[in-house]
Amino acid sequence: MIKKLLQTIIEEKILIKNTIAVLTSTALGGALGAATTILLSRVFTPQDFGIFKTLTSFYGFFIYFLDFGFQNTIIKYTSEYSSKGKEEKIRHLIHNLFIFRILILIPIVIFSLAFKKEIAIAFLNNENLSYLIYPAVIFSVITFSDLTRPIIIGLQNFSLLSIINIAVPLSGLLILIPAALLLGLPATIIALGITHLIGSTISIFFLIKKNYHVPTKYSLFRWPRLIFSYGLPLYFSTLPSYAFLGIIPFLSLFFDQNKVGYYSFALSFYTVAMIVPVSISQILLPRVASLSPKHALETLKNTLFLYLFIAAMEILFVYFLAKSIISLISPNFIPAANLVIILVTMATTLGFGTLLISYFTAKKKLGLVLVLNVILASVFVIVSLAATNFFL
């Protein structure tokens, strides 16, 4: 077993080198994000924390739900075009998808402002909180306009990605907590959008230096065929995966904001546990896209083997230490301790599926991507509903 592990590490040294860089920065970013969550849980009551998470998750869900698979399209084809020196095609793709994002954003804003009371009643159970839709819309405009992360991943600039992985949560820690302490919920929601803006600004300087802002000879409204041949089919095959993004607004339809707050707190630990498989998948997708079928399959096998050891350690850690850690860092959320254990265990298990989805996405096996996403989403939603109902 040890010999196999060492051999795998040697064979996949490029993948592991990039993964370590991204994973280290993501882990540090995750630690900063966790610190922010802990401090927010001390500033806000479980109810206010639930409201904050419900609104930001509601609009975060729509950001990805209305993406139509274009982020993965950018990652895959930016990687392919970059390796072939087709810079103009990269620029054309980026410009097209940015314009599309803006066109999608307009009805979101109009709908939110027109039905702010209905949204507050449905998801916050309080019409008087409809004023919070205004800062939530500002948050959505900032975050929905950003396409820089998938571009950076597609270009395989993992050094810059590592910087962003740290800069965004660090700015969150420095901005969100003062906003929560001094200005309350509305300012905290807007501040979360500003943290994303800081990360995209760093990337924009790099992209301008690479001349990706320069217009191409193609019309902005001449859509590349790959958007329809790859982007849209991929979107429909990955729709079930958006269950994670919509779970908090979904639970708010069935449970009060206190329980939603406890679940949101536990979900932050799920997010931390998913750092490893998500980081690896960010490296795996563009790498598999650039490899021959034989080498790509071998890379997948080695990646799953390495992840097995990491998953086992995460499960043991949370099982034995979760309650002690929560009682120390955020005693108001002790009722969520068992939920934390369940969600982290689920996260490490579903991590295998995340890696498989990344592989099959790169190989254009969209039918398998759909099946895997349905399985993962179904498990996630069912476990979340059951655990919230029985353990809170």
Image (cartoon, rainbow, N blue to C red):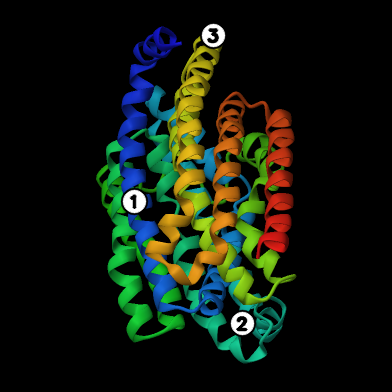
Type of amino acid at the residue the image marks with label 3: Lys
Up the image or down, 89 lies above or below 204; here it is: above
Q: In which quarter of the image is residue 91?
A: top left
Disc 1 target residue? 29
**CA separation, marks 3 and 2?**
52 Å
Residue 105 visible here: no
Q: Residues at badges 1 and 2 in contact (C-beta under 8 Å)?
A: no
Residue 250 visible here: yes
Q: Which of marks 3 and 1 is nearer the N terminus?
A: 1
Image quarter hosting the C terminus: bottom right
Disc 2 target residue? 113
Q: Which residue is drawn at 59% across and 36% down?
A: 349
Q: Is mark 2 on a helix, strand or loop?
A: helix
Q: Which residue is drawn at 38% across and 62% down?
A: 328
Residue nearest the observer in this picture, 376 or 64: 376
**CA separation, marks 3 and 1?**
34 Å
Looking at the picture, how far across and down is residue 17, in whole percent?
A: 31, 25
Type of amino acid at the residue the image marks with label 1: Gly
Q: Earlier in the sequence, mark 3 or mark 2?
A: 2
Residue 294 badge: 3
Q: In which quarter of the image is residue 116?
A: bottom right
- Residue 357 lies left or right of residue 139; in this view the side is right
Looking at the picture, how far across and down is residue 300, in whole percent?
A: 53, 19
Looking at the picture, how far across and down is residue 313, in whole percent?
A: 45, 34
User: How many labels, in total?
Assistant: 3
Q: Dot 2 surroundings within 10 Å: few (below 14), some, or many (20 or more)?
A: some
